[in-house]
Image (cartoon, helix red, strand yellow):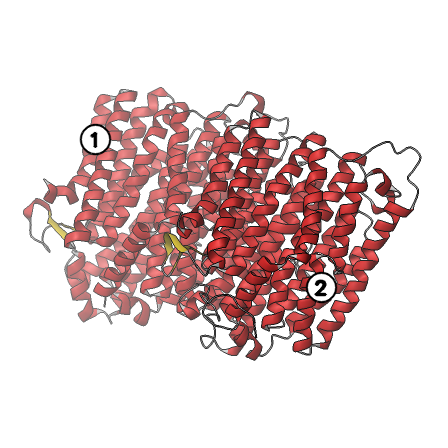
Amino acid sequence: MTAETLLWLTLAVPAAGTLGIWATGKVANLREGVTLVTAVALCVLVALLAEKVLGGARPALTLVKTLPDAPLHLAVEPLGMLFALIASFLWIINSIYSIGYMRGNKEAHQTRFYVCFAIAIASTMGIAFAGNLFTLFVFYEVLTLSTYPLVTHKGNNEAQRAGWIYLGILLGTSICLLLTAIIVTYVQVGTLDFRAGGILAGKAPDWLGALLLLLFMYGIGKAALMPIHPWLPAAMVAPTPVSALLHAVAVVKAGVFTVVKVIVYIFGVGYLAELPWTEWLVYVAGGTVLLASIVALTADNLKRRLAYSTISQLSYVIMAAALFTPVAIMGAVLHIAAHAFGKITLFFAAGSIYTAAHKTEVSQLDGIGRLMPWTMGAFAIGAVSMIGLPPSAGFISKWYILMGAMETEHVFAIVVLIVSTLLNAGYFLPVIYRAFFRAPPADARHGEAPLPIVIALTVTAAGTIVLFFLPDLPLALAEAVAQAATGSSPGAAPGSVK
Amino acid sequence: MAEHFPVLIVLLPLIAAPLCVALRHGGGTWLLATLATWGSFAISIALLAQVLEDGTIKYQLGNWVAPWGIEYVVDELNAYILLVVTAIASVIMPFAARSVPAEMGQRGVYLFYTMYLLCLSGLLGMTVTGDAFNVFVFLEISSLSSYALISLGRNRKALHAAYQYLVLGTIGATFFLIGVGLLYLMTGTLNMADLAARIDKVEDSRIIYTAFGFIVLGIGLKLAVFPLHAWLPNAYTYAPSVVSIFLAGTATKVSLYLLLRFIYSVFGHSFTFDKVVAGPLILVLAVAAIVICSLVAVWQRNIKRILAFSSVAQIGYMLLGVSLGTVMGLQATLLHIFNHAMMKAGLFLACGCILYRVGSMKLVDLQGVGRRMPWTMMAFTLCGLSLIGVPLTAGFISKWYLVTATLERGWWAAAVLIVLASLLALVYVGKVVQAAFFKEPETGVVNLAEVREAPLSLLIPTWILVFANLYFGIETDISADIAGQAAKQLIGASR
């Protein structure tokens, strides 16, 4: 198959899967079969595509001409490739997990759940492979709308309220700020294509460039920069598989992915480094890292703690990108991958605890590690990756971000990295301590969660470790992104940065 | 045959109307009306193709040479409008077959189709004619029949709404006639092309300015420009479903066409924008319509009223494009005429389905209706997304063109306003969607448990428009290109 065929298949396969899931909704086993087959097929397609991209291919494809000079257009570049790889691989694991979770908890409306999930994945592929800002925006909105029924899955008042916060913030920021920024870019430049080195340089006065950065950063609500983060904790009312894949991987990563993409391919790192009034981004992102960690310290609800941890980790990526230097961009890209594996493991563990023991608060977890060794072992690995210790993926990405901060001699960023590492340890280690070193309550009779759940969290925890020892693939892609950031041609073979 | 198309498109419904009275048979009149409407639709496609191929078509009525005889002129602009009007009229015919007898009783059916065909021929005549007085004739035909159509609504308030519209509509038509009379006084001609040529020499006279005022005000009343929109919400709310759909999709569009025709083709661009300086005035009214009527729509409790106020706000968007006075602005306006006809007709069609099954348009009565009528409410939601301007729907394309047109003129504030007003649309569409899908039914007058999904003959037309909204939101080659050509032609030919 040619790379172009693979490209449109990555959208068509999950879309077809959506129809299949809907059609087979009456027969649960068949429906889950369709989900799994679709997920595996998608992952294989993305992997085949990745092989070609690593070989230097940059397939592109115009779907329809919707707007003059801004058609619905797909174009693969390394950053999107990495994002698609992560999302499609984790979808398989998450589907296995979902089956265990949804059945274990006897959730209602399961067909709707799987249908929306497949649409969300299809739109994530669209975001990853978007060839211009317009296409990205379209899929970004589809992702928001398709995840809304997942957030309000329970259908009670709390879920409704959370749904309104979710839609209100994500749609509000994207329509008011992001769309405005896109239109202004279009009017100024005349195109919305993602190009290595950016398209804005020399096309807009300084004040407008700085304003655009502000509009973009706060328009991309999915990146959860403070103070537009409240949708993320609110979204935690969703069933855990949703929090795990969407609100730790697909949706939030779509946010920071868009941030990096805009900084690298729309502004251009060189242009931003010269532009005045852009310093604020490092401080706001750094502030978000610290503040969210402090909130996480005080949260007793496990999913809430994880949500704030996510907000904090997302801002690592933004802060790294905001250093406007290739090494830090590499760190940002790697952190997208590292955090995805670590955080999905943590959420899987939280859902596993809920399914087996019906516990949601950290203070209830005394001794649970003895009853659920696999779950809590995976949790510990995920936590180590969040803190950024070897041997976990989190260590590598933090290393690159720290190198970027050192290179630009940005003292604030360095301090943030050190302090937040301590804070991360501060809110994760007590959980592990409680789970393993305190006696379980006398009446605890549960064991491990259902097998699909255990398999899923074991795989992602193992992935976190594997990424530390074999980081070649993400490194190669991250280097290619960093190269594009310096403005050299995107087709060049990936090599070292300096 | 083909050379007679410009007059045939008007004659077809005009001749069919009295035949309906002669026929008096419910199903028979429906068939006749459907054939006439679909015939007009086919002709409008042929006309558009012909115009795009060979340029403007001129047709001398009865072979009396213009400017003495009446001349019909079809260029890109009115071929486009003809297409919009006949397309909407054609889509609703299958819907009417079921909805009209249900709402008006079997005995009123033939009267309905008579009035409907007269109204259609009036609208088409206004669009196709190149003669200012002839416009007035057709304006009266369409107005009188639409008063009668609105009064057919089953709520007694429909009579009041029709009367209100009659008073204001008559004032509008009279103002228009006074304006045309003044023009005739100064130029001695009624042919539009001839008028345009002769106004040049006398355009500094105060009488021409007065004529401009009367004509714009008169059309403004029919167009429901804010603050002359008082008749519209009641008329749309209490009219029978089919009439609401038809008027929302066509009547205001034709009035807007007339406005464009007069300010560009008769008075000319430079007279309108440089001498009278109408641009800022239109802008202020447009902005007021967008903001105020969107806000009012948010507070309404009846779905049709929400949509009616939203219509006035949408007319504001179209006028905003006009007030820019540029090709891009005009293109955005024309595109929005097309797209808005699709989305509003789709929304009112969904309302018709609800009314057919539930019998109420109040939000309170419709809580939880989404579970009983999923297809209807899904159609409403999708057309509602288009109204908001969500990407991949036709509404997004209109707004995109409009915003880029305002930015091209450097009107940042207007661009921001358009975006913010979209959020108001989100609120009022969201209110309906939330009530239908996410609220528990209230135990009131209406028993939702017995409500079933609307019949296919109502659903299919609705979903045709839903797909049109999606199709023209993705593939814009046809709609945007024709709108662009019409805009260029209109401004290019204008002085």
Q: Position of residue A221 (x, y in %)?
A: 61, 57
Label annotation for residue B91: none
Q: What is the chain letter for disc 1?
A: B
Visible in this render: residue B476?
A: yes
Label annotation for residue B16: 1
In the image, residue B461 sits, relative to residue A413, either above or below, namely above
Which structural element holds mark 1? helix
Label annotation for residue A288: 2
In the image, residue B2 sits, relative to residue B358, either above or below, namely below
Instruction: Depth check: give the residue in front, A82 or B369.
Output: A82
Q: CA distance from mark 2 to mark 1?
A: 71 Å
> What's the residue type where badge 1 is placed?
Ala
- What residue appears at the point 75 percent right and 69 percent down from the top-left corner? A416
Tell us which disc is closer to us: 2 or 1.
Answer: 2
In the image, residue A431 sits, relative to residue B189, either above or below, namely above
Q: Position of residue A34 (x, y in %)?
A: 54, 33
Q: What is the chain letter for disc 2?
A: A
